[in-house]
Amino acid sequence: MNIGIVGLGLIGGTYAQNLIENHNVYGIDINNDSLLFAEEYGYITKGFLEPRDILGKCDVVIICLYPNQIYDFVKENEEHFKLNAVLTDASGIKSKLVEEVEEVLRDDLDFVFAHPVAGRETKGVRNSDKLIFSKGNFIITPTKRNKLSSIELIEKLANEIGFLNVNKLSASEHDEIIAYTSQLTHVIALALVNSDEEKYKTELFIGDSYKDLTRIASINSELWGELFFGNKEFLVNKLDHFISYLEKYRDCLVNRDELEMSKLMEEARIRLGRTNES
Amino acid sequence: MNIGIVGLGLIGGTYAQNLIENHNVYGIDINNDSLLFAEEYGYITKGFLEPRDILGKCDVVIICLYPNQIYDFVKENEEHFKLNAVLTDASGIKSKLVEEVEEVLRDDLDFVFAHPVAGRETKGVRNSDKLIFSKGNFIITPTKRNKLSSIELIEKLANEIGFLNVNKLSASEHDEIIAYTSQLTHVIALALVNSDEEKYKTELFIGDSYKDLTRIASINSELWGELFFGNKEFLVNKLDHFISYLEKYRDCLVNRDELEMSKLMEEARIRLGRTNES
C-alpha cells in the first residue's frame, strides 16, 4: 500500500519505522530536516514538503498532527486526497475533533479516528522508536459514516505495527477513560514537580517511585495544553474525583484512622490486581 | 567483619546479597523458611532464629524491621549485643525512632540511623535483589552520640553495597524531604488507583504513564501505614501543598487560562530539568 504520514514527529516517525517494512511510506512535513533525517535512516520511502505533491497517491493517510491542526489540514487539502482514501489520526482527544472534521470531509473519504495510547516524554522524529508501539493499547472510535472495511484496515495496521490490544469506543467514551488514564496522570506528574519546595537537593533523596511519577512531567506543553483544554469537562471531573481520594487519605492521617486507611490501601491493591491480571 | 542482619525480608535480603562477598553475614529472623532460603542461595553465612545466639559476635547489626519493631528489638536484646557494636537500620522515618531508641540504647553501643532510599513493590527475601541498591541514594541521620568512626563505617558500607550518593541530614530534615519524595508519591499512586471508577476495562486503555504512576500502589500496607502515620505532620503538609497545585491546574481548566497553565507546565519542565541534570 501507499501510506502517507502527515507530521513526521515522535509518533509519525514511529508509525513510519513500523510501516516501512511492508509499504511505500511517504512523509509529509513542513520541516525539511525531519524529512531528510527520515529518508536517510530509511524510515520513509520519500519525503514531501507539499501535501498536494503526494496525497493523490496515498491509499491511507495517517495524520500525526496536534489535534487543533487536523481540521485545517483536512480542509486545506480537501481536493488533494486520493479517491476513496482512508484517513486516520493519532490524537488523544476525540469528541470535538470527530465533529469538526466530519463536517468538512469529502464524501468519498473515510476517516477512521484512532488513538495509539503510546508516547514518550520527548518529541521529534529523531526520538521516534519502533518499540514505542510494542504491545500497547490502540483505540478506534468508529463513527456512523465509517465503512466496516476501513475500520478493519486500520485495525489490521494497528496489529501490524505492534499494538497488542485494539479496542473500539465511542468518541465520548474514549475521552472519558483517557481523561483518567492519560491526561490526569500527566497533571499529577506536573503538580508533583510544581509542588517541590526546593528546600533540599531533591535529586539526592529520591528513589524509583519519585522517578516513575515525574518522568512524564517533562512535557510537550503545547500538545498537552491542547489535550487538557480539549477534554476539559472529563478532566476536571477526574481531577476532582482523584482529589477527593487524596483528601480521604488526608482525613485518615489527621484523625489517626488506621482502619479506614488500611481499607483504602487494600481496595487499591485489589483494584490494581484486577488491572494487572486481565 | 561479622555483620548481623535482623529481619531477612526484601531489604534485609538485599543487604545480605551485597555484603556476603566481603563479610560473614548472619541472618536473624523469626521465619525459619526465610533463613533456610537465604542459606541455600548463599545470601548469608548462617541463619538464626534466636538473636541471642549470634548478636554477641556481630560487629555491625543492620536492623531491617518495620519502624515500630526496632525499639522493641533493641530493648529486648540490650544485653546480647557485642561490646561497642555499631547498629544501623533501614527505616523510612526517623524523628520518633531516633528519640525512642536512644533512650534505651546501651552506653557502649552506637546506633547510626540510616535510610537506603530504595525498594520494590514486593516483599520477602525471595524478592530481594542485589541491584535494588545499585546507584541509589542513601541517607544517614547522625545524632549527637554518634562517633565519627561509626558514621564513616556505615558510609563505607553504603558505598560498598552499591549506593551512589550518601548524604547526611538531621532526622527532622530527613522526614520532611522523604514525606515529599517517598510517602507523598505512594499516597498519590494509591489515590489514583482508588479513584478508578471502573466504568471501563482500564487495562485496555492505559499507556506507560498510568503504569508508571500506579506500579507502587501495590503496597505493603502494614509497612506503609506505619510510615504514613509515623510522619503524619510532614505528610499532611506535603499533601496539602500538592493538592493546592492540582487545584491551580483545575482553575486554569475551568477559567480557560491557557497562559497560566503553560506557565505552570514550563515551571515543572525547568524544575525537573534541574533535578535530572544535577
Image (cartoon, coloured by chain):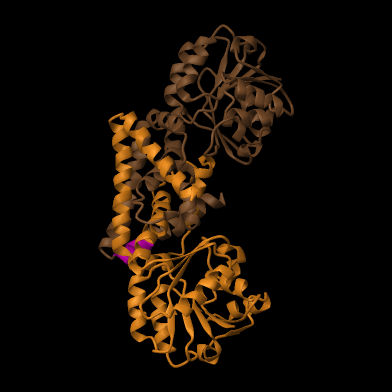
Chain colours: A orange, B brown
- Above or below: residue B248 compared with residue A108: above
Q: Nearer the viewer, residue B46 or B86?
A: B46
- Provide the major secondary structure of the magenta segment: helix
- Residue at the image position 32 percent from the left and 33 percent from the top: A260
- Residue A204 x %, y %: 54, 41
Kindly tell me whether residue B237 is visible in this rendering.
yes
Q: Nearer the viewer, residue B125 or A85?
A: A85
Kindly tell me whether residue B155 is visible in this rendering.
no
- Above or below: residue B51 compared with residue B266: above
Residue extending farthest left = B255
Q: Give the quarter of the image for residue B47.
A: top right
Residue A122 counted in the magenta span = no
Residue B258 counted in the magenta span = yes
- Residue B101 x %, y %: 47, 17
As drawn, is B161 to the left or to the right of B189?
right
Residue extending farthest top = B79
- Residue B33 x %, y %: 61, 23
Range of magenta residues: B257-263
